[in-house]
Image (cartoon, rainbow, N blue to C red):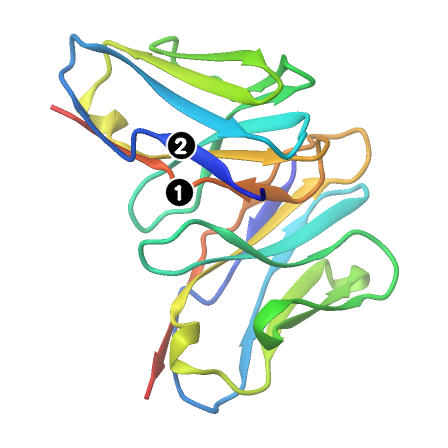
Amino acid sequence: DTEVTQTPKHLVMGMTNKKSLKCEQHMGHRAMYWYKQKAKKPPELMFVYSYEKLSINESVPSRFSPECPNSSLLNLHLHALQPEDSALYLCASSRVPGAEAFFGQGTRLTVV
Amino acid sequence: AQSVSQHNHHVILSEAASLELGCNYSYGGTVNLFWYVQYPGQHLQLLLKYFSGDPLVKGIKGFEAEFIKSKFSFNLRKPSVQWSDTAEYFCAVNAGDTGRRALTFGSGTRLQVQP
């Protein structure tokens, strides 16, 4: 199994909603990542979890809250988002920090 | 901090033409270098990687890249492109030592191959 699975694939939410994005991998990888990708732009790093501990937070607004319940799962909790937060949210994992990353298909988020 | 530059933003080629996409990085320490491809509607896929050793690395689908340390470059090449190579190509770098161990991406190159 070399897949990173993200759910949901699409999400539309209002600015007052609370929702969560989920990411799962069963490759035994110990580093997991959240990236944000706007149209026609490269992925931008948001958070890194290394051995289930948050190791990098790229000054992301607190309306985005990551969580790593165990080594296979990564969540991104969303609250009070703005329309400019609409983007493709990508999850990735790597065997260890710095190794090649495997990406999921992403969740396309629209904030209305 | 590490950064990556891709100077070709949009490349249009005919099938069977040769391809070279430029990538330059900025980081003072050891780096790991990657090329990823994003086909329309699909997830990012690793084309090839360089960690150490032979600076000429071969990847999937006939792609190769050469690491030139003195030029801080990691250019992607393919001798003969196909229509199916139409995609967005991203160069990426992470620190190979104790620095930031997460990928920083270049701005991407959109490759359009005409039949």
Task: Give the residue at x 70% y 31%.
Answer: A97
Residue linked to disc 2: A6
Task: Give the residue at x 85% y 54%.
Answer: B52
Residue B110 visible in this rendered orientation of the protein: no
Q: Quadrant of residue B71?
A: bottom right
**Disc 2 secondary structure class:** strand
Residue linked to disc 1: A105
Residue toward you, B30 or B46: B46
Residue toward you, A82 or A12: A12
The number of callouts visible is 2
**Disc 1 secondary structure class:** loop
Asked whether, in this view, residue B42 is left or right of residue B101, the answer is: left
Q: Quadrant of residue A81?
A: top left
Seen in the picture, residue B90 relative to A46 is either above or below; the reply is below
The three-letter code of the residue at mark 2 reads Gln
Crowdedness near tag 1: few (<14), some (14–19) or many (≥20) residues, C-alpha within 10 Å: many
Residue toward you, A105 or B70: A105
Seen in the picture, residue A94 relative to A20 is either above or below; the reply is below
Residue contact at pointers 2 and 1, CB within 8 angstroms: yes
Which chain hosts label 2?
Answer: A
